[in-house]
Image (tube, rainbow, N blue to C red):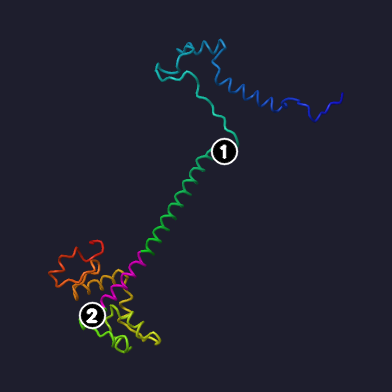
Amino acid sequence: MTVDYMDMDFGPTVEESVDSNNESNTLGAVYSPYKSDKAARMMKSMGYEEGRPLGKPSQNGILEPIQVQKRDGRQGIGFDTEKKRKHSLEVHEYNVVKSEFRSRVREEQDSVKMRTQLAKMQEACFNLDCQRAVADEDELLSDPTKARRANVLYRRPILERACANLVLETDPDLDKFEALSIEEQLEMANSYLRKKHYYCFWCGVLYDDDYDLMSCPGNSEKAH
């Protein structure tokens, strides 16, 4: 009969047996009650009775030693704490980036919205000025010289239409107006519409006078 030594099971190695025995002996020593006469006498002399809780009498007293938790791997003391700290830091950084991104998107959307509102207010200012003969549409749109003297609130769009093929000259008043924040430009155009023409941009209503304008909810978008 031929024996294939490659398929034979020789059982656990010496090192595996030693490790297994050491572990069993260690855990067994922890969980086994004192059996030696000397140890038993010492425990009894201190008031210990087998099967009763350790320490002062209490319903919550433990009957067995705290179990030893065996850890697999060699990660070292404090590894879990460091891992949790890094994870917490990564989550925090992710939330910060997400919050900043949302804030930036919201600011861009608000900027686009306000610039659209400003363009509409400028158009309203120009149309109402023309209706009340404050400005002459034909002259402003056909004569670049007069377009440069248009109300600064709507001068830019008028210049772009009247001087589309011309090089625009330096305009200190227009530069000063456009250097303001978009919120400030909106406030100036809105104030002009209300005080000069009794027009509420947010209502879309042309009121008769100051008294009539008092029926408007307010001079801001939020009030409407």
Q: Could you say which disc has been placed on residue 129 in the image?
A: 2
Instruction: Judge whether residue 122 is colored magenta.
Output: yes
The quarter in which the C terminus is drawn is: bottom left
Q: CA distance from mark 2 to mark 1?
A: 80 Å
Residue 44 versus residue 125 in the image, above or below: above
Secondary structure state at the residue bearing disc 1:
loop
Q: Amino acid at mark 1?
A: Gly
Instruction: Judge whether residue 136 is colored magenta.
Output: no
Q: Amino acid at mark 2?
A: Asp
Q: Residue furthest right?
A: 1
Taking depth in this image into account, of 29 and 87 the one nearest to the observer is 87
Task: Say whether disc 2 or disc 1 marks the residue closer to the N-terminus.
Answer: 1
Residue 211 in the image, given as x and y percentages of width and height: 12, 69
**In which image quadrant can residue 30 be found?**
top right
Secondary structure state at the residue bearing disc 2:
helix
**In which image quadrant can residue 101 be found?**
bottom left
The magenta stretch is: 110-125
Q: Residue furthest left?
A: 211
Q: Could you say which disc has been placed on residue 64 in the image?
A: none
Residue at the spot 21% in from the left edge and 66% down from the top edge:
219
How would you rate the neighbour count of disc 1 (Cα within 10 Å): few for under 14, some for 14-19, many for 20 or more?
few
Q: Could you say which disc has been placed on residue 76 in the image?
A: 1
Residue 76 in the image, given as x and y percentages of width and height: 57, 38
Task: Kindly report the secondary structure that dominates the magenta region of the rendered protein.
Answer: helix
